[in-house]
Image: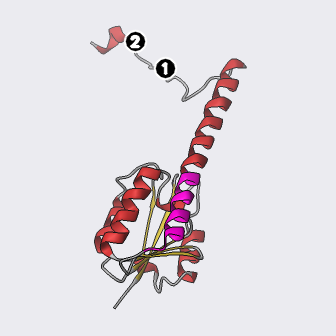
Amino acid sequence: MNTIYGYARCSTNESKQDINRQKRELLSLGVTDEKYIYWEYQSGTKTDRIELNRLLDVVTAGDSIATTEVSRLTRSTSHLCELMQLIQDKHIRLIIGSFVVDCRSEDIDPMTKGMFMMWGVFAEMERDIISQRVKSGMANAKAKGKQIGRPTVCSMFSNEDKT
């Protein structure tokens, strides 16, 4: 039996981002039960994610992986290329919203593959733009005299008292 698995990811923890929207969308994409959804709170730039690796270990030829958008899989074009090769090698189908990359047969339509890879480029570019904005905002705040980063913690004991 071929199974449709889902993968959901948010960058920050559950108190800051709700992953349930993605879970609902995965069910509408054909995942039959939440037990087939692998989800985690990890940065999309990390290539070694526990739940994504578990999912990739579980899928077999003919299975499908559904995700809501390519940036949920990764925000790195090099990692996306690795994932694409793995999907081809395992002969599985990737469902990204209404976009399908079907690798169950030997040949993949070049336009489909190209579009998939372009999405990866845009996901990485979006990540880079966000990072650039954050750095610019921090520099601007610092120029205005604001403290950047965590506040310093004062110890009740001086270095002399610790010995």
Residue 55 visible in this rendered orientation of the protein: no
Q: Is residue 151 above or below residue 16?
A: above
Q: Which residue is the extreme one toward the bottom?
A: 1
- Identified by mark 1, the residue type is Cys
**Which residue is labeled 2 in the image?**
158
Q: Which residue is the extreme one toward the top?
A: 160
Q: In this view, does 24 lie above or below 139?
A: below
Residue at 54% in and 52% down: 121
The answer to whether residue 119 is magenta is yes
Quadrant into which the C terminus falls: top left
Q: Nearer the viewer, residue 143 or 110?
A: 110
Residue at 49% in and 20% down: 154
Q: Position of residue 144 (x, y in %)?
A: 72, 19
Q: Where is residue 134 in the image (x, y as percent from the top left)?
A: 63, 36
Q: Position of residue 56 (x, y in %)?
A: 33, 68
Magenta range is 108-123
Residue at 42% in and 51% down: 78
Mark 1–mark 2 distance (CA, rounded to whole Å) = 9 Å
Q: Residue 144 carries which label?
A: none
Q: How many labels does the image show?
A: 2
Q: Which of 119 and 47 is in front in this view?
A: 119
- Left or right relative to 141: residue 87: left
The overriding secondary structure of the stretch rendered in magenta is helix
Q: Position of residue 14 (x, y in %)?
A: 53, 58
Residue at 58% in and 76% down: 25
**Which residue is labeled 1 in the image?**
154
Figure coloring: secondary structure
Quadrant into which the N terminus falls: bottom left
- Left or right relative to 27: residue 87: left
CA neighbours of label 1 inside 10 A, class few (<14), some (14 to 19), many (20+): few
- Identified by mark 2, the residue type is Ser
